[in-house]
Amino acid sequence: MKLFVAAISLAVLAGCATKPEQKASSSGAASAAAPSTAPSASSASVATPKSADANARDLARKRISSVEPAVYFDFNRFDIKPQFHNTVSAYGNYLAVMKESKILVEGNADERGTVEYNLALGQKRAEAVSIALQAIGANANNIEAISNGEEKPRNKAKSEAAFAENRRADLIVR
């Protein structure tokens, strides 16, 4: 989990980095040798942050629409498996970019175990996803983590495949 958090944090930081030399190189050789740190007064530089912000919002929306809005867990576990890192990353980035948005994380469990145990396990699953979202840059105030325990099964059959569908945390944008 720590490795995942570190990798995601580095990816977010790398994605935010800009190189002044690249911006200055279009101005000519003299400008490239001594890049200016003063902001440009041109109207193009004023429009760029707005278009960059709009592009980031569009990309964030596309990313969450391309992943399933759920993280599935192994029996009696609440650690996030590697195959769901893309889902967590997409939603964490969405919350980091769309600062006004909120996400409800609903932790769920299969029917095996007591009601109390399944409520606690569902809460741990929801909180694990919430912590991972925050590690990517989401504001904790925009995330609500709750447990449904075994009360909202996705599949009511009594098979291992059905139980696996029910061991999840659903991510709901509000």
Image (cartoon, grey):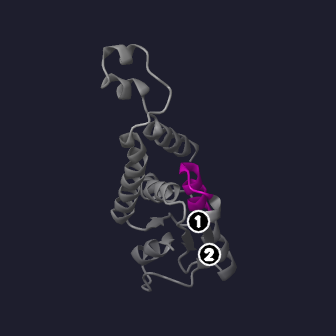
Up/down of 113 relative to 19, above or below: below
From the viewer's perspective, is 61 left or right of 120? left
The answer to whether the residue labelled 1 contacts the one labelled 2, judged by CB atoms less than 8 Å apart, is yes
Task: Report the front residue among 33 and 113.
Answer: 33
Give the numbered dot on residue 147: 2
Principal SS element in the magenta part?
helix
Callout 2 amino acid? Ser
Q: Is residue 100 visible?
A: yes
Residue 11 at x, y = what percent? 46, 40
Question: Which residues make up the magenta segment?
Answer: 126-139
Up/down of 22 relative to 104, above or below: above
From the viewer's perspective, is 128 left or right of 27? right
Kindly identify the residue that appears in the image at 39 percent across and 55 percent down.
54
Residue 125 at x, y = what percent? 58, 65
From the viewer's perspective, is 100 left or right of 58? right
Task: Report the front residue among 11 and 115.
Answer: 11
Give the numbered dot on residue 125: 1
